[in-house]
Image (spheres, rainbow, N blue to C red):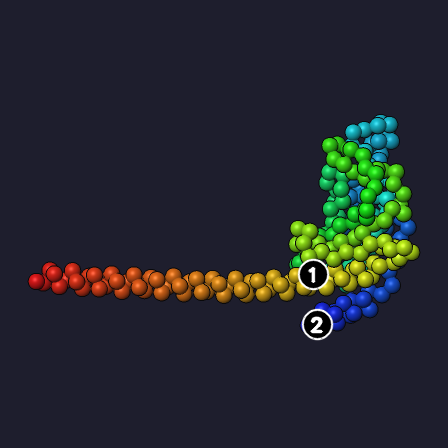
């Protein structure tokens, strides 16, 4: 049962998710991370065999591993409620999303504030030697357009790892909110289409009537 009130839904999901811990390793990853981790492992093995390759591991550093562990914990928390999360690598960045039912939302974990960067393959990326304690923020991006986002960040002793249940519950609420909005938009679109069809029908009737009157006038002229 999904409560009508979204605050009630949030409380329901928080209670159902319960306490969430973040594993220190990725030995048992969520299936949404498996392909990305396999790709990383292949890069690592190739780099070890040849001492150097162009395609090095992208997240084989303290901060990259921490980001993956946080995503893994969020995905596992969502799976407890029958939802799904997944991530893939593109251009050295992690691209992640959550699916709440059939509704998709973007997820992102970025660095808070200024930090050292290096240029890799034409892109500016965080320096690989940044410590795991570098402040991070997790953002929900419902429309994949960086609009109407909700975010959490490391705050003193309250790290993102301590907010996983709250984040997962918020993702579920955001998914439900987006789903309801899509229903309203579909209804409004159907109403606009119906109004447009009726307008076209009325215009067609006017044209028919004008044609009928013209035919009558033509008939009268012919009779005369």
User: Residue 145: in sight, yes or no?
Assistant: yes
Q: Position of residue 12 (x, y in %)?
A: 78, 70
Q: Quadrant of residue 223?
A: bottom left
> What separation in Å lies between label 1 and label 2 (alpha carbons)?
14 Å
Lower position in the chain sequence, tag 1 or tag 2: 2
The answer to whether 129 appears left or right of 187 in the picture is right
**Residue 68 vs residue 8, the one in the foreground:** 8
Residue lying at 68% horizontally and 64% vertically, measured from the top left? 176
Identify the element where label 1 is drawn. Answer: helix
Q: Helix, strand, or loop for circle 2?
A: loop
Residue drawn at x 76%, y 36% is 124
The residue under the point 43% across, 62% down is: 196
Left/right placement of residue 11 relative to residue 102 reads: right
Camera-side mark, 1 or 2: 2
Q: Quadrant of residue 92?
A: top right
Q: What quarter of the picture does the N terminus occupy?
A: bottom right
Mark 2 crowdedness (10 Å alpha carbons): few <14, some 14-19, many ≥20: few
Looking at this view, is 128 or 75 the one in front? 128
Task: Name, please, the residue furthest toward the front.
Answer: 114
Q: Position of residue 166 (x, y in %)?
A: 81, 62
Image quarter in which the C terminus is found: bottom left
For the image shown, how many numbered marks are present on the structure?
Answer: 2
Q: Which residue is mark 1?
A: 175
Q: Position of residue 11 (x, y in %)?
A: 79, 69
Inspect this view and state whether residue 84 appears: no
Task: Please determine whether, in this image, residue 119 is positioned above or below residue 15.
Answer: above
Task: Name the residue that disc number 2 marks.
Answer: 5
| Mark 1 neighbour class, 10 Å CA radius: few under 14, some 14 to 19, many 20 or more | many
Tell me: residue 139, above or below residue 45.
below
């Amino acid at each position: 049962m999904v409560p009508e009130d979204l605050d009630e839904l949030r409380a329901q999901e928080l209670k159902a998710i319960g306490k969430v811990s973040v594993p220190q390793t990725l030995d048992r990853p969520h299936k949404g991370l498996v392909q990305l981790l396999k790709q990383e492992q292949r890069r690592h093995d190739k780099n070890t065999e040849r001492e150097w390759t162009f395609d090095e591991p992208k997240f084989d550093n303290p901060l990259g591993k921490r980001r993956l562990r946080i995503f893994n914990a969020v995905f596992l928390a969502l799976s407890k409620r029958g939802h799904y999360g997944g991530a893939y690598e593109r251009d050295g960045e992690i691209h992640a999303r959550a699916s709440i039912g059939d509704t998709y939302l973007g997820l992102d974990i970025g660095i808070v504030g200024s930090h050292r960067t290096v240029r890799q393959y034409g892109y500016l990326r965080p320096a690989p030697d940044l410590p795991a304690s570098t402040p991070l923020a997790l953002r929900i991006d419902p429309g994949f357009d960086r609009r109407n986002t909700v975010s959490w960040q490391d705050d003193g002793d309250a790290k993102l790892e301590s907010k996983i249940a709250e984040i997962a519950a918020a993702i579920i609420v955001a998914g439900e909110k987006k789903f309801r909005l899509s229903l309203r938009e579909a209804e409004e679109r159907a109403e606009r289409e119906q109004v447009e069809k009726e307008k076209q029908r009325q215009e067609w009737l006017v044209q028919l009537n004008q044609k009928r009157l013209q035919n009558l006038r033509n008939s009268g002229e012919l009779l005369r």
